Image: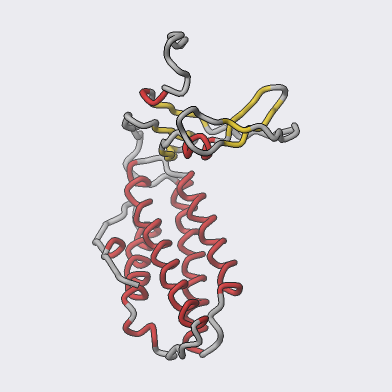
C-alpha cells in the first residue's frame, strides 16, 4: 500500500500489523545503523541481511509507543490508536504452550526452593547466587509467551507472569534484608504474604499439567505488599 506523499511514513499509527515470526539464519554482518522516528525519542537497532535492512521488532515497538504480543508463530505489533483482535482456533492449551509453561513453573519452583533453603538454613541470601535462578526462570517465561496460541494459552499467561513477578519480589526482599545486615529468622517465610502468594499461585498453575484448563481462583492476582 502506497502512502500519500503528504503523510509522514511514521504515521503508521493507524495500522494494525501482524508480523510473521521467521526463523532466520543471519549470515551477514550486523550494521551500526539505527532507526529513528521524527518526534519520538530513542532508536531501534538495524541489521543488514543480504543487502536489506531489518529493524529489531522490540526496538520498533519501543520508539513507536506500540505494544507486542505473541500468537503462535506470529509477532503482533499493535500501534497506538489501534486494537488487537486475533481469533484463536482452539479452546484447549496448545502442546507447545503446555510444555513451555511446565518448564517455566519448574524453573520458578527451583528458584523458590533456593531462597527457602537459604533462609531456613541461615546461609547468605545474595543476588550473585540467586541471579542464575532468576535468569533461567525469566527465559522460560519468555519462551512460554512466544508459545501462546489458543484462547486457553492466552488466559493462563497473565497468571504465569504474576507468579514470576511475585517470585522476583520475594527474592529481592530477602536479598535486600541480607545486604542490610539485618538478621533473617529461619522461619521468616512462615508468615510472609509473598511466600503464600507464590505457593498458592503455583498450585493453581500446576493444575494445567493435569487438566486442559486453567481455573483462575484469584490467587495469582491478590495484591501483596513486599
Q: Is residue 124 above or below residue 169?
A: below
Q: Position of residue 120 (x, y in %)?
A: 47, 88
Which residue is found at the position 28% from the left and 61% from the top?
Answer: 221
In-image side of 14 versus 45 (left or right): left
Viewer-nearest residue: 94 or 61: 61
| Total numbered badges shown on the rendered structure | 0
From what the image shows, is residue 22 above or below residue 214?
A: above
Residue lying at the far left in this picture: please name it.
Answer: 217
Q: Residue at x 26, y 65 (%)?
A: 222
In front here: 138 or 60? 60
Q: Residue at x 75, y 32 (%)?
A: 28
Residue 48 in the image: state x and y as whole percent.
69, 28
Is 48 displayed left or right of 182 in the figure?
Answer: right
Colour mapping? secondary structure
Q: Position of residue 72 (x, y in %)?
A: 46, 38
Q: Is residue 88 left or right of residue 134?
A: left
Reply above or below: 48 against 118.
above
Question: x and y percent of residue 196 in the render?
Answer: 33, 75
Q: Residue at x 47, y 10 (%)?
A: 2
Q: Relative to 8, does residue 206 appear above or below in the rendering?
A: below
| Image quarter of the C terminus | bottom left
Residue nearest the observer in this picture, 127 or 88: 127
Amino acid at each position: 500500500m502506497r502512502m500519500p506523499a503528504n503523510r509522514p511514513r511514521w504515521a503508521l499509527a493507524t495500522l494494525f500489523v501482524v508480523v510473521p515470526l521467521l526463523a532466520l539464519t543471519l549470515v551477514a554482518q550486523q550494521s551500526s545503523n539505527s532507526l529513528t522516528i521524527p518526534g519520538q525519542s530513542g532508536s531501534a537497532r538495524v541489521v543488514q541481511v543480504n543487502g536489506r535492512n531489518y529493524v529489531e521488532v522490540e526496538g520498533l515497538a519501543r520508539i513507536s509507543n506500540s505494544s507486542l504480543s505473541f500468537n503462535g508463530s506470529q509477532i503482533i505489533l499493535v500501534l497506538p490508536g489501534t486494537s488487537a483482535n486475533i481469533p484463536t482456533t482452539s479452546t484447549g492449551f496448545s502442546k507447545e504452550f503446555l510444555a513451555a509453561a511446565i518448564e517455566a513453573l519448574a524453573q520458578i519452583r527451583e528458584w523458590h526452593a533456593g531462597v527457602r533453603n537459604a533462609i531456613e538454613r541461615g546461609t547468605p541470601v545474595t543476588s550473585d547466587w540467586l541471579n542464575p535462578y532468576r535468569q533461567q526462570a525469566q527465559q522460560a517465561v519468555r519462551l512460554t509467551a512466544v508459545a501462546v496460541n489458543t484462547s486457553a494459552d492466552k488466559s493462563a499467561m497473565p497468571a504465569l507472569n504474576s507468579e514470576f513477578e511475585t517470585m522476583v519480589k520475594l527474592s529481592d526482599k530477602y536479598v535486600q534484608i541480607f545486604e542490610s545486615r539485618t538478621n533473617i529468622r529461619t522461619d521468616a517465610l512462615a508468615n510472609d504474604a509473598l511466600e503464600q502468594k507464590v505457593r498458592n499461585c503455583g498450585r493453581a498453575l500446576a493444575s494445567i499439567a493435569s487438566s486442559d484448563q486453567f481455573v483462575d481462583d484469584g490467587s495469582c492476582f491478590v495484591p501483596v505488599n513486599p
